[in-house]
Image (tube, helix red, strand yellow):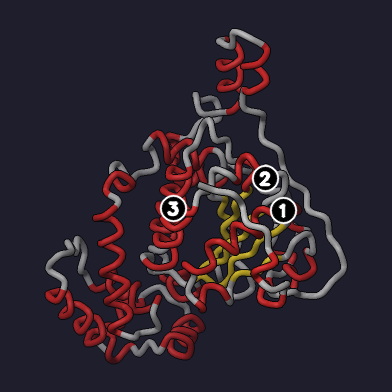
Amino acid sequence: AEMTHLQAGLSPETIEKARLELNENPDILHQDIQQVRDMIITRPDIGFLRTDDAFILRFLRARKFHQTEAFRLLAQYFQYRQLNLDMFKNFKADDPGIKRALTDGFPGVLENRDHCGRKILLLFAANWDQSRNSFIDILRAILLSLEVLIEDQELQINGFILIIDWSNFSFKQASKLTPSILKLAIEGLQDSFPARFGGVHFVNQPWYIHALYTLIKPFLKDKTRKRIFLHGNNLNSLHQLIHPECLPSEFGGTLPPYDMGTWARTLLGPDYSDENEYTHTSYNAMHVKHASSNLEREASPKPMKRSQSVVEAGTLKHEDQGESENTQPLLALD
């Protein structure tokens, strides 16, 4: 087939997986892409800034080659960027806000993939220093990271896993997670990005995160809901889905603890420096130096806490088997 150069670099196993799981057929790849491209004229309200074959192919893969669905995703991808222009202004790793988020480990990206070839992204929620990083900048850093990772065709087919560790995440931090910004994140990730998310795993979530989750559930598609697992402090249930060989020690895995700078160094390259003004030590020193009172010194950012989960014996509990939703307390959020 003349179009198989679009699959260049893929292993035979992955090509077979794409055929079985995604209905990808090398012989008609070109027609599939063209049919999506032909739909663009139906949405003159949206600026489709990229329409090349390789780009459209990502959307087909993310929607199992249902052309209408793939086109809807493509339209939403550009519409989201159109509606949230300020988020995508200077959408580069060296943008100060994005750079700060990356340097603080948002997101963490493990070098090795899981047993299904999926890339594992980590979020250590407690490391969100709200005096340094806005939620929007963290979201921008995550979207930019996905944008870089999705260039890899293997990942277009195998997808991603997201693990969020909520250990030591305070009620005060949680109160900043308003429904509107959570909705922005869900729209950006679930409805507007051409990636397959194989699972979103919550670890060590406190009751108020469970409550928040109940609050945002209506914005989640059924398919997304089925892929969200609330493990609490039961790491055995996590290990049933992601092998410990693929996980750092924070998640009871056999790999060393995750180094927060790993992904930032990859993305920023020579621009990344441990000694720059973004590191916590110099930031703290600066903050304390100008603090006029003990009170302010109390409020200055704490160095990052690393979480350590507790491994407990237990079986996999899926969130749907939890207690009925209306018994969950809700956060009083504005």
Q: Compared with residue 70, is residue 299 higher up or lower down, i.e. above or below?
A: above
Q: Compared with residue 324, is residue 15 higher up or lower down, i.e. above or below?
A: below
Q: CA distance from mark 3 to mark 2?
A: 20 Å
Q: Compared with residue 165, is residue 306 higher up or lower down, i.e. above or below?
A: above
Q: CA distance from mark 1 to mark 3?
A: 21 Å
Residue located 76% across and 53% down the image:
249
Q: Compared with residue 52, is residue 260 higher up or lower down, i.e. above or below?
A: above
> Which badge, 1 or 3, comes first in the chain's sequence?
3
Give left or right: position of 230 versus 20. Answer: right
- Residue labelled with disc 2: 169
- Residue labelled with disc 1: 206
Amino acid type of the residue that numbered disc 2 sits on in the rendered structure: Phe
Residue 77 in percent (x, y) is at 31, 64
Q: Which mark is residue 180?
A: 3
Amino acid type of the residue that numbered disc 3 sits on in the rendered structure: Ser
Residue 1 in percent (x, y) is at 27, 89
Residue 209 in percent (x, y) is at 64, 55
> Which badge, 1 or 2, comes first in the chain's sequence?
2
- Of residue 185 and residue 115, the one placed in the foreground of this image is 185
Q: Residues within 10 Å of mark 2 (few under 14, many from 20)?
A: many
Residue 55 falls in which quadrant of the image? bottom left
Front disc: 3 or 2:
3
Residue 287 in percent (x, y) is at 57, 17
Q: CB of mark 1 within 8 Å of CB of mark 2?
A: yes
Q: Secondary structure at mark 1?
A: loop
Amino acid type of the residue that numbered disc 1 sits on in the rendered structure: Pro
Give left or right: position of 142 versus 28. Answer: right
Residue 161 falls in which quadrant of the image? bottom right
Residue located 47% across and 67% down the image:
219
Residue 66 falls in which quadrant of the image? bottom left
